[in-house]
Image (cartoon, rainbow, N blue to C red):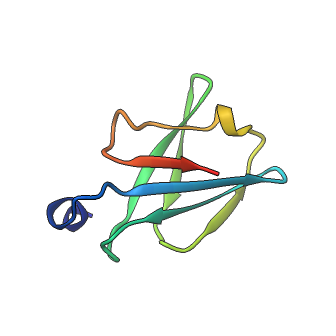
Amino acid sequence: MFEQYLRHTALPVLELKFADGSVSYRWKVDEQGFCDADLVSVQREIGRLFSRRLEWQTMKTALAKDQFEVATDLYFVEVSKG
């Protein structure tokens, strides 16, 4: 994970896509060995979204796009909601 921050200027981007009661997610990074876990905030509740791969992964969710928040104040990452 640290190689991404040490050797590249771009921040990791957590890409999110919402459709049909599910969210798809993946990391967009320069370092292939990058992996991280982001905290997802859901109206005062905190859960963990584990994204250990660079390929798209999908999970069911009852949350709307505007309710799904990543704790960017805890990590140096960007979030792209599509």
The front one of 11 and 39 is: 11
Q: Against 57, is 36 above or below?
A: above
Whole-percent x and y of residue 39?
47, 42
Above or below, comparing residue 10 to residue 64 in the picture = below
Q: Residue furthest right?
A: 20
Quarter of the image where one finds residue 29? bottom left
Q: Is residue 20 left or right of residue 13?
A: right
The residue shown at (46%, 63%) is 27
Q: Position of residue 63 (x, y in %)?
A: 73, 38
Q: Is 5 or 58 nearer to us in this picture?
A: 5
Q: Quadrant of the N terminus?
A: bottom left
Q: Residue furthest left?
A: 6
Q: Place residue 66 in its image quadrant.
A: top right
The residue located at (43%, 56%) in the rendering is: 13
Is the residue 54 above or below the residue 43 in the image? below
Task: Kindly give the residue lying farthest to the bottom in the view shown.
Answer: 32
In the displayed structure image, the side of residue 72 where residue 9 appears, left or right? left
As drawn, 39 above or below 53: above
Horizontal side of residue 58 vs 28, given as left or right:
right
Closer-to-camera residue (54/37): 54
In the rendered image, residue 48, in percent from the top left (x then y), is placed at: 52, 46
Where residue 59 appears, as percent x and y from the top left, is 70, 58
Question: Relative to 64, is 73 on the left or the right?
Answer: left
Instruction: Please state the total of marks drawn on the protein image.
Output: 0
Q: Give me the residue at 74% from left, 47% from top.
A: 61
